Amino acid sequence: MSLAGLASFAQASGIAGIAGIAQAAGIAGGLAQPGTAEAEEAVPSPRERIRRLYFPNVVLRTQDDKPVRFYDDLVKDKAVTINFFFARCEEICPLVTSNLAKVQRLLGDRVGRDLFMNSISLKPEEDTPAKLKAYAEMHGARPGWTFLTGAPADVELLRRSLGFTNPSAKVDKDLNQHIGNVRYGNEPLMLWAACPGQARAEWIVESVSWVMQPAAKPAMARG
């Protein structure tokens, strides 16, 4: 997939560059003169607009019980994957988690350097850092893959902001039918897309390789 194709897919996925929106905001404002400091302050950059719309900077806790800010610490200036799960899930979660563990093995030491993986619990009131640590160890997660919990309201805000919702309100409330997709992207380049979490691990690696830093595609490690 070319970067142009990835950008088109990103638009379809709900997170994409919004330079046009930023320009429109400048026209609608009509108060600050173009090129002035006031104009630059009044019209956020496309990257900043994306941050405000899609990446709430809520505080989460890692499996090591470390507090982190979602945008500042986990997303900003990085290429990342993001998915949602919960530890006691007996349906889609273990399948996706096991598949992502294979993805991590295929990528080798590039995870934690060129790509950072993030899994967020949909049952934060249940999934304490200690439970997440045990869950990560059970699935063979390695450094570079962070499991996260937090305040229920903050997790719900993230879920909705990142587009992990179902059009059916009834289905959306049923955690056993939660979205099993993996969001991936390169924050500074404003490239975002998604893929099914149960897709072939090799295909997921191929997909995320286009947004990893540096831009060159990785050679897969033997897993």
Image (tube, rainbow, N blue to C red):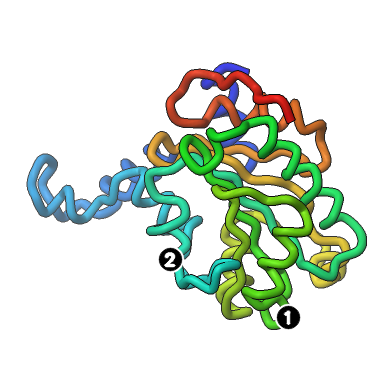
Mark 1 neighbour class, 10 Å CA radius: few under 14, some 14 to 19, many 20 or more? some
Out of 217 and 25, give the one closest to the viewer: 217
Quadrant of image for the N terminus: top right
Out of 26 and 205, give the one closest to the viewer: 205
**Which residue appears at 77% of the width and 51% of the height?**
97
Q: Which mark is residue 74?
A: none
Relative to 109, 29 lies left or right: left
**Which residue appears at 38% of the width and 44% of the height?**
77
Q: Which residue is mark 1?
A: 126
Out of 24 and 47, give the one closest to the viewer: 47
CB under 8 Å between callouts 1 and 2? no
Looking at the rendered structure, the number of numbered marks drawn on it comes to 2
Mark 2 neighbour class, 10 Å CA radius: few under 14, some 14 to 19, many 20 or more? some
Quadrant of image for the C terminus: top right
Residue 192 versus residue 40 in the image, above or below: above
**Which residue appears at 46% of the width and 51% of the height?**
75
Q: Amino acid at mark 1?
A: Glu
Q: Quadrant of residue 161?
A: bottom right
Q: Amino acid at mark 2?
A: Arg
Instruction: Indicate the secondary structure of the residue bearing disc 1.
Output: loop
Q: Position of residue 144 (x, y in %)?
A: 55, 48
Q: Which residue is mark 2?
A: 69
Any part of residue 61 in sight: yes
View extreme (bottom): residue: 125
Q: Position of residue 201 (x, y in %)?
A: 77, 33
Residue 136 versus residue 185 in the image, above or below: below
